[in-house]
Image (cartoon, helix red, strand yellow):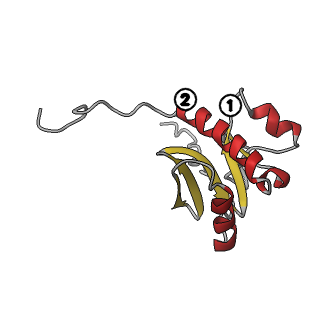
């Protein structure tokens, strides 16, 4: 009987530190005062940002990242910004890009960038299951 060599289990990777200071969180939320119904929720050491229930941004390691797609990615890349990379030892990135400091400090421009990201996130968000779907007892 020949024993096959087994592959080691795939590593999920090492998360980069994502802790956010209370000062940075408060500053970003103050800058987002012009955006409707912003809610900040702690997640994995960082903070998820929502507008009217739509997940549009991430605060990680005192950096703001916003949701992008083909409609707004070039704006970030033109500023030399890069995608959120949650793992220190893996090339995986997410479709959230770092916001330039000059935009973060300009409330009006930041509001425009966030509104574009909310639109992107709303278009790409999975549709909620219809009522009654997946219910037990059928």
Check disc 2 and report its element: helix, strand or loop.
helix
The residue at the far left in this view is 137
Please say whether residue 92 is visible from this viewpoint. no
Question: Quadrant location of residue 133?
Answer: top left
**Mark 1 sits on what residue?**
69
Q: How many C-alpha atoms fall within 10 Å of the one at disc 2: few (<14), some, or many (≥20)?
A: few
Residue 69 location, x and y as percent? 68, 31
In the rendered image, which residue does mark 2 sit on?
123
Foreground residue among 115 and 45: 115
Extreme residue in the bottom direction:
22
- Relative to 76, say whether 58 is above or below: below
Query: Mark 2 vs mark 1: which is more N-terminal?
Result: 1
Vertical arrangement, residue 21 with respect to residue 58, above or below: below
- Residue at (76% x, 33% y) in the render: 73
Q: Is residue 136 left or right of residue 134?
A: left
Percent position (x, y) of residue 45? 58, 65
> Residue at the spot x=68%, y=64% of the render?
17
Seen from the viewer's position, the closer of residues 138 and 2 is 138
């Amino acid at each position: 009987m020949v024993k096959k060599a087994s592959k080691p289990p795939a590593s999920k990777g090492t998360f980069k530190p994502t802790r956010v200071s209370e000062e940075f969180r408060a500053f970003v939320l103050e800058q987002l005062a012009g955006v409707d119904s912003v809610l900040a929720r702690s997640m994995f050491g960082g903070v998820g940002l929502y507008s009217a229930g739509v997940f549009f941004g991430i605060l990680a390691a005192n950096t703001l990242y916003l949701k992008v797609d083909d409609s707004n990615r070039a704006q970030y890349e033109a500023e030399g910004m890069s995608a959120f990379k949650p793992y220190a030892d893996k090339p995986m990135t997410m479709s959230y890009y770092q916001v330039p400091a000059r935009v973060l400090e300009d409330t009006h421009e930041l509001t425009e960038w966030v509104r574009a990201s909310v639109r992107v996130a709303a278009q790409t968000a999975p549709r909620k299951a219809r009522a009654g779907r997946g219910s037990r007892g059928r």
